[in-house]
Image: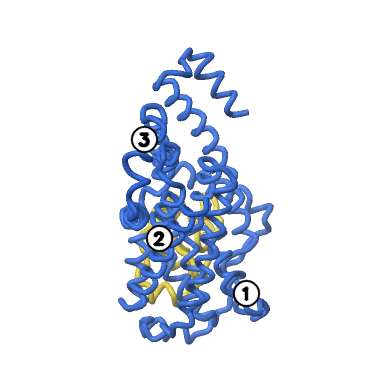
Amino acid sequence: MIESLADWLIYGIAGLSETTHWGKAVHFFVYETVKIGLLLLIVTHLMGAINAVLPIERVREWIASGRLRGAEHLAASFFGAVTPFCSCSSIPLFIGFLQGGIPLGVTLSFLITSPLVNEVALALFIGLFGWKVTLIYAGSGILLGTVLGWGLGRAGLGRYVEDWVWEIAQDRADGDGPERKPLREQLPAISREAMEIVTGIAPYVLAGLAVGAGIHGYVPTGFFQEYLAGGNPFAVPLSVVLAIPMYANASGILPVVQALVAKGIPLGTAIAFMMGVVGLSLPEAMMLKKVMQPRLLATFFGTVGVSIVALGYLFNAVL
Amino acid sequence: MNIEVLGTGCSSCQTLETRVQRVVEDADLDGTVEKVEDMQEIMKYGVMSTPALVVDGEVKSSGRAPSVQELKDLLGA
């Protein structure tokens, strides 16, 4: 529907030709802007509602309750995915989980998935790559958090958590958090906050789409297959390393990545790159440095990074 | 009234602080607004997501920046 609207606007009303570079680029920009704008609105509202019904304090209580019988890592990873992520909240979350009596490994499961799978990334993935790739991305992100949290938990890294954290964690906390109104009454606030998220990232997304549109219109199909992607066996680790400093512009980068995939960059490399952008965030590392000793911090980010590279190779082989 | 804004400097923490200041000034409330950035201090209130708003030692909201209207209710302005 949006596609035919874009067709009508660009090729009909504006009179641009489907066969020109400029026409293709403008069509891509208009079509994707409308589609992604709608998806962002829907997904941020949905996540806001989930968060209102299931505040983080309740998630903590549930994971700590012992009722999950071994599925704690998976549950923590899953809730990490549906909880909005802000790097400035990673320490309160980290300590809050430990205070609730949740083991370090389960807490790390949450921390790995939380930035990796977030509402903005999901909306952009659905819009740019479709449902199948989105499910692969979200599913592998949740799996990554589950498995790595489990492994890191068994590695006995607790002694590398700063002492003051354990001291605070002695004071058990299991409160319900601040008082909340029923969902119905929270809806205006949820909607307003969703709008704030969308307008906040809009400039990045639009800039990314503009660059993506340029690539779609002017770079010949298969361009990168010839010059870049196929030949270099280190494309995956290289793209993950390149991704690390790009966290701040995550929402602007995805549209560009999509355009690159359309021109021949392998999908696995692209997924690994995106996971690197959001999952290996420097601001988060700077925050966690206050609660984790260098050894734990390095192990944490190292294993996540290596796993992302492995996933990239895997996807390149099977997709 | 002792109002504290807990947060380490993310954008919504700054938004909350600005809004709280505005509500306090507009309604001419008799209170102090303090920004708490020290992580150990923040954790004493048991909040799990920032920014959080604390009034006289009680956590009123966490993880979001309530609107000016909502803040007026929370602060009794």
Residue located beneath label 3 in the image = A223
| Disc 2 residue type (three-letter) | Val
Residue A309's tag is 2
| Disc 1 residue type (three-letter) | Ala
Provide the letter of the chain coloured blue: A
Residue A274 x/y as whole percent: 42, 52
Residue A236 x/y as whole percent: 37, 55
Give the spatial CA distance, label 3 vs label 1: 45 Å
| Disc 3 residue type (three-letter) | Phe
Mark 1 element type? loop
- On the image, which quarter does residue A287 sit in? bottom left
The residue closer to the viewer here, A179 or B74, is: A179
Residue at 55% x, 67% y is A77
Do residues under tags 2 and 3 come within 8 Å of each other at their CB atoms? no
Instruction: Give the mark nearer the N terminus: 3 vs 1.
Output: 1
Label 1 marks which chain's residue? A
